[in-house]
C-alpha cells in the first residue's frame, strides 16, 4: 500500500484527467449520436445513408484505429493539435457517438407509429414531430443503456494512455514501470480510481431503469 499512498497525487491527477476526457467526450457523443439517430429516421435518403455508413463503420472498427486516425493521420493531413487531449476527445466522442446513435434509434423505434402519424395529420413537419413527440419519449426509455455506453466510454478512455495522454491508465503504467516490485498494488490502485467513476454511473443506471419501469 505504500506505493499507492506515496503516489496519491499522481493517481488524483490521472483521475481528474480521465474525468475531464470522459465528460467532454460524453457530452459531444450524446449530441452527435442524437443527431445521427435523427438522420437514421430522416425522410432524406442522403442523411439516412450517411448516418448508416457512419454508424456501421465506427461500431465495427476497433477504438485503437479511431485513436490512430485522430492522433496520427489528422496531423499529417494538416490538422494540428496543440494538446493530444484534443485528439483523444475527437476519437472517443466520434467512436462513442455511433453506439449512442443506435441506442437512441432503438428508442425512437419503440415509440408507437400512430403518434407520429397523428402529429403529421395535424400538419406538423418531420422536425417538429421528432423534437416534440418522438425524441422526448425515446430518450426517456434509453437512459439506462445510454449510461452503460458512458460507462464503457470511461473505460475506453484508457486507450488514450497509449497515445501520449497522461490520464489514469497512463499514470498507472508509469508507476508500474517505476515500481516493478509493486505492480499488483499499482494496478489495484488504478482500478480503484476507475471504480470511483464507473460504480456511481452503474448505480444511476439501475435507479433510472427501475423508475422508467415503474412509469410504464
Image (tube, rainbow, N blue to C red):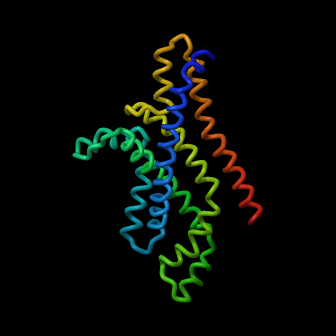
Residue plotted at (62% across, 69% down): 137
Q: Quadrant of residue 46?
A: bottom left
Viewer-side residue, 48 vs 73: 73
Q: Quadrant of residue 138?
A: bottom right
Left or right, residue 199 beside residue 106: right
Viewer-side residue, 216 vs 9: 9
Vertical arrangement, residue 55 with respect to residue 64, above or below: below
Residue plotted at (68% across, 49% down): 204
Vertical arrangement, residue 122 with respect to residue 179, above or below: below
Left or right, residue 201 beside residue 125: right
Viewer-side residue, 4 vs 41: 4
Residue plotted at (39% across, 71% down): 45
Viewer-side residue, 89 vs 117: 89
Vertical arrangement, residue 28 with respect to residue 21, above or below: below
How many marks are shown on the rendered structure? 0
Q: In which quarter of the image is residue 112?
A: bottom right
Residue plotted at (49% across, 20% down): 175
Of the 4 image quadrants, the one containing the N terminus is top right
Of the 4 image quadrants, the one containing the C terminus is bottom right
Left or right, residue 182 beside residue 208: left
Measured as percent of width and height from the top left, residue 153 is found at 52, 44
Q: Spot the residue most to the right.
A: 214
Q: Spot the residue most to the top.
A: 181
Measured as percent of width and height from the top left, residue 34 is found at 49, 62
Measured as percent of width and height from the top left, residue 196 is found at 63, 37
Measured as percent of width and height from the top left, residue 78 is found at 22, 46
Amino acid at each position: 500500500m505504500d506505493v499507492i499512498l506515496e503516489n496519491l497525487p499522481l493517481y488524483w491527477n490521472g483521475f481528474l484527467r480521465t474525468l475531464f476526457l470522459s465528460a467532454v467526450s460524453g457530452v459531444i457523443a450524446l449530441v452527435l449520436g442524437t443527431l445521427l439517430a435523427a438522420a437514421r429516421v430522416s425522410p432524406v435518403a442522403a442523411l439516412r445513408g450517411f448516418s448508416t455508413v457512419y454508424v456501421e463503420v465506427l461500431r465495427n472498427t476497433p477504438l485503437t484505429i479511431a485513436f490512430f486516425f485522430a492522433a496520427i493521420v489528422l496531423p499529417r493531413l494538416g490538422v494540428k493539435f496543440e494538446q493530444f487531449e484534443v485528439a483523444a476527445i475527437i476519437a472517443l466522442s466520434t467512436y462513442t457517438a455511433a453506439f449512442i446513435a443506435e441506442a437512441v434509434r432503438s428508442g425512437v423505434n419503440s415509440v408507437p407509429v400512430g403518434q407520429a402519424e397523428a402529429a403529421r395529420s395535424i400538419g406538423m413537419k418531420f422536425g417538429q414531430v421528432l423534437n416534440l413527440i418522438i425524441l422526448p419519449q425515446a430518450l426517456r426509455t434509453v437512459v439506462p443503456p445510454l449510461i452503460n455506453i458512458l460507462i464503457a466510454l470511461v473505460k475506453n478512455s484508457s486507450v488514450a494512455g497509449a497515445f501520449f495522454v497522461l490520464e489514469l491508465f497512463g499514470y498507472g503504467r508509469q508507476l508500474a514501470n517505476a515500481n516493478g516490485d509493486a505492480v499488483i498494488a499499482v494496478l489495484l490502485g488504478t482500478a480503484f480510481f476507475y471504480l470511483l467513476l464507473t460504480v456511481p454511473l452503474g448505480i444511476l443506471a439501475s435507479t433510472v431503469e427501475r423508475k422508467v419501469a415503474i412509469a410504464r
